[in-house]
Each structure stands twice: as C-alpha cells, then as structure tokens.
Image (tube, grey):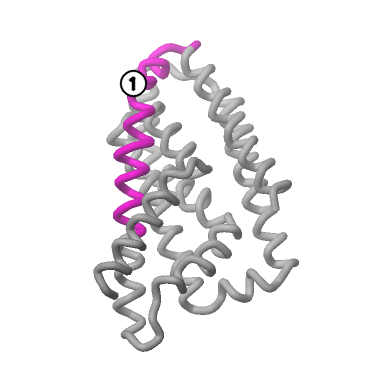
C-alpha cells in the first residue's frame, strides 16, 4: 500500500469514525456513567466487532449477507431489537448512590466489552459498508494479508482515538450529573431515548 493510498484510507476512516452512531452513543453513555477511563472497555468491545466485520468482508461472507435479503433483514432486526433493549433498560435502570455506583462500575467491565461488541456487530449495514469501502484500498497485485493488516490497524487506531479521545472526552464534563439520583435519571432517559432512536432508524432507513 502506497503512502498516498494510506493517507486516503486514513482520511476516510477519520470521517467515518466521527459520524455519530450507536457506537458513539454507547461510548458517551459509558463515559458519563463510569468515567472517561472506564469507557475504554466499551470501546475495546466495539473494536473487536470492527475487526470481525473486516474479517467477514475479507472472507467473502459479507457478500453473502449483502446479497441475501432474508439474512440481511434478520441481522438488521436483531440489531434494532438489541439497541431498543439497551434503550429501554437504560430508561428503566434504577439510579444508585455514589458508593454503589463505584462497585457497579468495577463489576461491569466485561459487560461493557460485550455491550460494545454487540452494539457494533449487530449492524448489517456496517458489513455492507465495509464491503464497498475496503476494496477501494486493496490491490489484487499486492500481498493481501499485509494490506488487510494495515486497513485493520488503521481502522482500529483511528476509531479508538475518536471514540475514547473525542466522544468519551466530550461526555466527560457531564459526568457530574451521574453523582446525583436526579442526574442519573436524566442521563438514563436521554441515552435510553437515543438508543431507541437509533434502533428505529436502523429499521426504517434502508
């Protein structure tokens, strides 16, 4: 991969990562609930899903998903259902006092990783997007493995910087609201509504 091609890839990935979506909402919600440092666990889960998406496309499975309306619809509905579940669960979550919140944050690292993973993996449009995006930067006359490794490394590095360095940081000043029961209720309701909103978009915007 030439420098010019890589710079084009880098620019494209930055723009894509900065586009608000379920991953950004998940990262901001985690940052406000467990703090900026704790939000990294959700970001890690999202990167694992991103890695899986690229592997799926590289293996050719993405083409099957893109060309199968039934499979695409099943994954799309599953993704929407999961986001709606996260939203409703957030809205119904009972606020906790500061001491309990710290204990809860320490326990839910694995949960945040899994949630970040499922938020990203259950998005068939991501597979279709990568199916159209990745081939633009892969040359058939050059080693495929190295090119995909560069693409994966660039995507993961940029997405971590954007999610943790931008979205989690932007949400950080609002974390003070999580210190009161009323503030927690507001945050839970707002992010719950955002998750439900993304679920609706996933269903109705084709």
Residue 18 falls in which quadrant of the image? top left
In the displayed structure image, the side of residue 36 where residue 23 appears, left or right: right
Up/down of 5 relative to 139, above or below = above
Q: Callout 1 environment at 10 Å: few (<14), some (14 to 19), or many (20+)?
A: few
Residue 113 coordinates in the image, percent (x, y): 41, 48
Against 2, residue 97 (above or below) is: above
Q: State the SS at label 1.
A: helix
> Pointer 1: what residue?
173
Identify which residue is drawn at 50% across, 72% down: 57
Closer to the camera, 163 or 192? 163
Whether 156 is drawn above or below 43: the answer is: below
Q: Position of residue 12 (x, y in %)?
A: 40, 56
| The furthest residue to the front | 4
Within the image, what quadrant is residue 197 found in? top right
Percent position (x, y) of residue 33?
41, 27
Where does the magenta region start and end?
A: 155-182
Q: Magenta span has 157?
A: yes
Residue 27 counted in the magenta span = no
């Amino acid at each position: 991969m030439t420098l010019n091609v890589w710079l084009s890839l880098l620019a494209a990935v930055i723009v894509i990562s900065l586009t608000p979506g379920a991953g950004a909402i998940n990262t901001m919600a985690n940052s406000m609930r467990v703090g900026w440092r704790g939000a990294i666990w959700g970001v890690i889960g999202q990167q694992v899903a991103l890695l899986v998406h690229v592997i799926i496309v590289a293996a050719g499975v993405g083409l099957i998903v893109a060309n199968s309306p039934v499979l695409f619809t099943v994954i799309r509905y599953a993704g929407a259902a999961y986001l709606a579940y996260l939203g409703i669960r957030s809205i119904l979550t009972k606020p906790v006092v500061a001491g309990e919140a710290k204990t809860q944050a320490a326990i839910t690292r694995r949960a945040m990783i899994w949630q970040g993973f499922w938020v990203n993996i259950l998005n068939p449009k991501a597979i279709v997007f990568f199916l159209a995006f990745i081939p633009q930067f892969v040359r058939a006359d050059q080693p495929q493995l190295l090119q995909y490794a560069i693409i994966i490394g660039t995507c993961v590095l940029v997405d971590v910087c954007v999610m943790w360095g931008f979205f989690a940081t932007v949400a950080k000043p609002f974390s003070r609201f999580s210190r009161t029961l009323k503030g927690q209720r507001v945050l839970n309701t707002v992010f719950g509504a955002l998750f439900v909103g993304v679920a609706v978009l996933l269903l109705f915007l084709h």
